[in-house]
Amino acid sequence: MSTITDSDQLGVEAIAAPMITSPRGFAAAGLHAGIKRKRKDLGLLYCHVPAAAAAVYTTNAFQAPPLGVTREGLAASNGRMQALLVNSGNANACTGEQGWEDAREMRRACAQALGISETLVGVTSTGVIGERLPLERIVDAVPPLTASLSPQGDQDFGAAILTTDTFTKAAEARVKVDGQEVRIAGAAKGSGMVHPNMATMLAFITTDAVIEPPVLQRLLKATTDESFNMITVDGDSSTNDMVTVMASGLAGHDTLDEGHPDWGAFQSAFTDVSRRLAQMIARDGEGATKLVEVTVQGAETLEGARQAAKTVVGSSLVKTAVYGEDPNWGRLLCALGYCGTYVDPERVDLWVGEHQLVQRGMAVPNAEEAAKEALVGDMVHFLLDLHQGTAAATAWGCDLTYDYVRINASYRT
Amino acid sequence: MSTITDSDQLGVEAIAAPMITSPRGFAAAGLHAGIKRKRKDLGLLYCHVPAAAAAVYTTNAFQAPPLGVTREGLAASNGRMQALLVNSGNANACTGEQGWEDAREMRRACAQALGISETLVGVTSTGVIGERLPLERIVDAVPPLTASLSPQGDQDFGAAILTTDTFTKAAEARVKVDGQEVRIAGAAKGSGMVHPNMATMLAFITTDAVIEPPVLQRLLKATTDESFNMITVDGDSSTNDMVTVMASGLAGHDTLDEGHPDWGAFQSAFTDVSRRLAQMIARDGEGATKLVEVTVQGAETLEGARQAAKTVVGSSLVKTAVYGEDPNWGRLLCALGYCGTYVDPERVDLWVGEHQLVQRGMAVPNAEEAAKEALVGDMVHFLLDLHQGTAAATAWGCDLTYDYVRINASYRT
């Protein structure tokens, strides 16, 4: 029932043991700098050459200073990035001018240790809002961090970017371009404040494809709209979300753009990595026990389909029903009814797994009992068919559990 | 710190022991018809004369049939209503044509028992979605229900309309119009699916004021926008929400309209009743331990102030922080940042109770420890000043607790 595009047909190979350092040219590292008490909290992603790069940022009005500093750097370097320094445990958000200075200082320390231009270094932070970064600890940790960069540093990097995540998140796909193998890999973190239009969600994508920054930016934007922007954990869009991509260009094929004969395959592999990372973030939503996938088809417009899917998957009442393994389809229809896009109640069909619960807006008699089995297990799929048009979209979320409350009622204590 | 308008100046008297039957002409009743297992589930509100009436309805696309039937009746009777039959335990929503027939049958039975025209009877339902009404039980219970109508039936009525509510909700205010005492009273129920633009939220307002239906409709709409539409429990707007008002016209003053010299006083009393009912619904949000009040001032527009206040009070992360009594102001600013209205981060001030936590977008040093005391107790007030204009609005919600999850993960089992 997964809606992952049929990337197999395009020769996309999903990799079982993904590494963000798998694409040619990349190394990574992660260590404990002392921002958190015990766990790793400072990570570095590095490319041996200045990579073509692109980024998308949170739309939150309180966008954190490191995002602004990264944006400045990308603009000054004409879309090139060679290193990305990430800390967890402190978001450097709502920190005013001091926050900007601290983000620049992080960047300066990293550029100096690597011997590269500051504008080639991106920085980002995730964690508690409103407290000043422990800058000295970070600056002190940068030299050992850069010294430990290695192609085998992917696990340390993946661990260093986490906050309340319960597992590291990585995905990788490979595809042929001009007969050459191109690798696309990524690492990500969630897991609260996750909502459409980005959240405290960081994702880092690497590839060895040969591609120019403007093309990469368009690809990232389009792909993000159907992956990272289609997940929601709790409706809160964070101050710090960012997705970046760095392309080393070391795969040795002709430069990719929308007109290249293998563009479709590359785009499919890129989308595949983004979606799998997005799904992992949703699955690891704070307190979650189940990944919830909602597909809306038969919508009049793509925007309407996306809005409907996101609204349903984000409904607290749907989320608690999933947690309770209760096929309470009335809650899904109710959420569909306030999603803001036009829905004709008398045309709606609803399935959970293979079980149809609603036909033309009304209950399928005696369907609920059998449908319960589709709610057991760690993956639940709902399909809503509006029978109004041909647009479709899928959104991902998770159930709402006691643990969500526990985690967030005691986050800082 | 309550933001209730200074209604005292206009001679509005709040009544400590409110009764929906207090305005001249009203009687009420409630009993157990067998829709729920044990508790009262069928209520009736009655006026000895055909009252001027008005109603506002949920905007959910899956608006339940009883709302349509009530709307039809009001249109056919030129805005008059004499009786309102309410059942809890079953929402009669997503029930298709059968649902319409059942709602009309409820209405017919009630009109027949009372010996009045069907178009003078409103009907409404709240409870589980997607199951057919147990119509026979309701029809059988109508004669004993009408026989028990009494001015002392307010408690039975208040109990019969509840679902997961933990207490009955009533409010009353009195005010002088042309020197005559006018009474305004109301009863309401929550408490899940409560969100701006109505929710499984029913409110019934009575008054003995002399007022025409179109004036009453305008008043109800405007008042609802700053009371019932400013509360949120979980972001889910229900299929069944409705607010109605019935005016018996028995207070013996000159007909009220916007030009009457006592209009301001009447409007203030009406708003006072609506707000107090709305606050009670928020306070009794599913699983709630605290009423949360968020005032946004200094906004450029009223719409922006309302949107900001509702977004902040509806944030799951703010709600869990309140539950944890954690003055985690970063979460409030974060929610403000994605509310969709323009906010200049560097101008924002934030108080909790009497404690200022944020000045011009940055933390007030060492303010949090003392601020914790403002989060203890069952009422928390946040004030956000955007320093961008002169518009202000207040929204109400509640904390998000383990019990919210428990109630909604096991609602039907």
Image: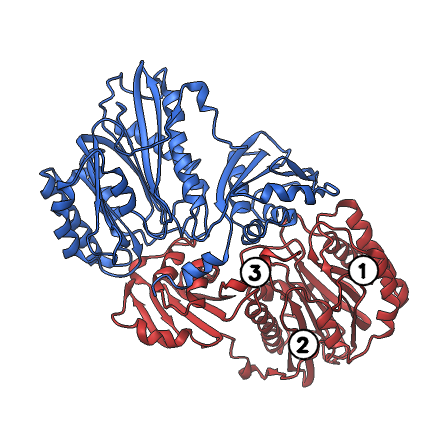
Chain colours: A red, B blue
Mark 1 closeness class: few <14, some 14–19, many ≥20 residues within 10 Å: some
Residue tagged 3: A406
| Screen quadrant of the N terminus of chain A | bottom left
- Residue at horizontal 47%, vertical 27%? B5
As displayed, is residue B280 above or below residue B207? below
Task: Identify the disc placed on residue A184.
Answer: 2
Residue pictured at 60% horizontal, 31% vertical: B389
- Residue holding disc 1: A77
Q: Mark 1 is on which residue type? A: Ser
Q: In the picture provided, is B16 more to the left or to the right than A144?
A: left
Residue B339: which disc?
A: none
Helix, strand or loop at label 1? It is loop
Contact between marks 2 and 1 (CB within 8 A): the answer is no
Choose between B186 and B303: the one closer to the eye: B186
CA distance for labels 1 and 3: 44 Å
Rendered position, A113 above or below A92: below
Nearer-N-terminus badge (3/2): 2
Q: Amino acid at mark 3?
A: Arg
- Amino acid type for the residue under numbered disc 2: Ile
Tag nearer the camera, 1 or 3: 3
